[in-house]
Amino acid sequence: MDEEVSGSPQRDRRKMIRYLATQGITDKSVLDAMLRIPRHLFIANALWDQAYADHPLPIEQNQTISQPYIVALMTQALQIQKSDRVLEIGTGSGYQTAILAELAGRVYTIERFPQLSQQACKLLGAASYTNIDYRVGDGTLGWPEEISFEKIIVTAAAPEVPAPLLTQLADGGRMVLPVGGRQLQMLLLIQRENQEFIREELCACSFLPLIGKEGWREELHSTTM
Ligand code: SAH
């Protein structure tokens, strides 16, 4: 991707990668992808000085770009292979999408806000990613054509695992998502073996709500739990 500022973003990115490595992110392919991708280009210029600090930052539509550590942890847990089809729910800024596109064969990403989806599509298109399909809609229902995915990542939190996503997870597949209350959730890794879904708890986390038929209802948006 084109970086208008030379020098310092790269240095900051290297520092971020060194930090992530001390936090248990050991998958080199994940660290390398995050070293390559200029996170600052996914946020407003006014926030560029914070682009490589380990916290979430605001994007448009009152949403956020996730914290780098959580992005790295979720990506690492997926163990993405070059042949994988990955379904992402919550395109947002497109930062996580770029990381997935670096590692996977093809990425299918769904966002409920058309403006965010269009912006991400424009940015990632300009960066020459050609293995990403974008959809605007309710990602809790999965990908409309119901193909199955080796990997699924949900970057907003639901009260329960959306059933259509379990159906669309391929046998042997892995899904990572936050599940719990409106403020605080548990990051889950779900592995499918035949008809069995094995759950593992990764860590406590705090994501914005997944709004949709199999998630939270929009009118409850400003209340807690
Ligand atoms: N991965 C993004 C995170 C964005 S925050 C990033 O790092 O930039 C979560 C995103 O999920 C928001 O953009 C929000 O609009 C989106 N979202 C919430 N509910 C959704 C749903 N049912 N379907 C698709 N996207 C949804």
Image (cartoon, rainbow, N blue to C red):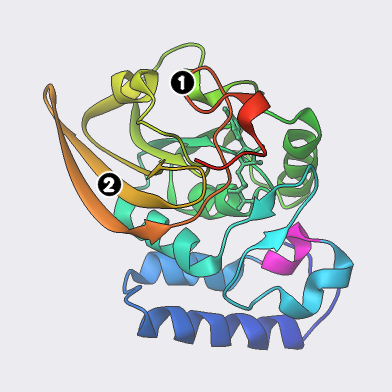
For the record, the magenta segment spans: 38-43
Q: Is residue 135 left or right of residue 166?
A: right
How many labels were placed on the picture? 2
Q: Name the quadrant containing residue 51.
A: bottom right
- The image position of residue 159, as x and y in percent, is 41, 34
Q: Is residue 92 left or right of residue 216?
A: right
Residue found 67% across the figure and 44% down from its top: 92
Q: Is residue 42 magenta?
A: yes
Kind of residue indicated by mark 2: Leu
How crowded pointer 1 is (Cα within 10 Å; few <14, some 14-19, many 20+) is rated as many
- The image position of residue 94, as x and y in percent, is 66, 48
Q: Name the quadrant containing residue 147.
A: top left
The Cα–Cα distance between marks 1 and 2, rounded to whole angstroms, is 18 Å
Q: Is residue 31 left or right of residue 119?
A: left
Element class at badge 2: strand
Q: Which residue is mark 1?
A: 214
- The image position of residue 70, as x and y in percent, is 46, 62
Q: Which mark is residue 32?
A: none
Q: Which residue is mark 2?
A: 189
Q: Is residue 46 above or below residue 112?
A: below
How crowded pointer 2 is (Cα within 10 Å; few <14, some 14-19, many 20+) is rated as many
Element class at badge 1: loop
- The image position of residue 59, as x and y in percent, is 76, 53
Main secondary-structure element of the magenta-colored stretch = helix
- Which one is closest to the eye, mark 1 or mark 2? 1
Q: Name the quadrant containing residue 72.
A: bottom left
Q: Is residue 35 above or below residue 121?
A: below
Residue found 47% across the figure and 85% down from its top: 19
